[in-house]
Amino acid sequence: MRIASGRRDDDFEINVISLIDVMLTLLMFFVLTTTFVQHAQMKVTLPTAASADEAEQREALTIVIDRDGRYFIDNNEVLNPGLDTLSEAIRRVAGDDRERPVSLRADAMTPHQAVVTAMDALGRLGFTRLSIATTPPAKARP
């Protein structure tokens, strides 16, 4: 007769080696496909919601861009819509004051390139105070 020892022959083991292999493969996949964003390189100044002084708005240089991409600087049309002509017209109207605020008023259907050209001309001249005029959305009726 056989006396049972403390150990049974039918004990089972869970083999976790294959599970570890799968987990390491998934970990490597996620690490290699993740995009790491370096926030230190992105320097963004967010706009504020405070209202501007009325005196500042009166002396602001106004550039209007209509639906067809034509430029108007203080109600005077710029005949050639090129970057150099636009820069020269802005320089003539603004003078040497690069701290003067600029208000850019573009039609909602204006081509995006026209707005970028105006912003590029202002940036090349050294203007740093630019605001883009918008209208508030219409309130929904209850």
Image (spheres, rainbow, N blue to C red):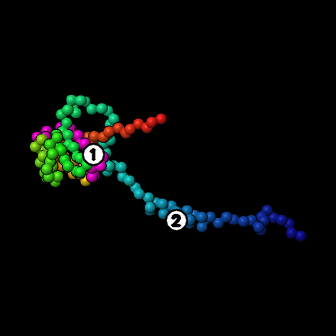
Which quadrant would the N terminus be assigned to in this image? bottom right
Residue 87 visible to the viewer: no
Say which residue appears at 79% left-offset and 62% top-offset.
6
Give the crowd class for mark 2: few <14, some 14-19, many >=20 residues within 10 Å.
few
| Of pointers 1 and 2, the one earlier in the residue sequence | 2
Residue 87 versus residue 51 in the image, above or below: below
What predominant SS class does the magenta segment belong to?
loop
Tag on residue 58? Answer: none
Disc 1 from disc 2: Cα separation: 53 Å
**Rendered location of residue 115, percent (x, y):** 25, 49
Where is mark 1, residue-wise?
A: 107
Task: Name the foreground residue: 50 vs 117.
Answer: 117
Q: Residue 60's image quarter? A: top left
Whether residue 21 is in magenta: the answer is no
Which residue occupies the extreme bottom position in the image?
1
Q: Quadrant of residue 36?
A: bottom left
Give neighbour class at mark 1: few <14, some 14-19, many 20+ (Cα, 10 Å).
Answer: some
Question: Which residue has dot 2 on it?
Answer: 25
- Label 1: element kind: loop
Q: Secondary structure at mark 2?
A: helix
Q: Is residue 11 left or right of residue 105?
A: right
Q: Nearer the viewer, mark 1 or mark 2?
A: 1
Task: Look at 60% across and 67% down and name the residue there.
Answer: 18
Q: Quadrant of residue 132?
A: top left
Q: Is residue 115 left or right of residue 24?
A: left
Span shown in magenta: 94-112
Q: Is residue 139 left or right of residue 91?
A: right
Q: Nearer the viewer, residue 6 or 85?
A: 85
- The amino acid sitting under disc 2 is Thr
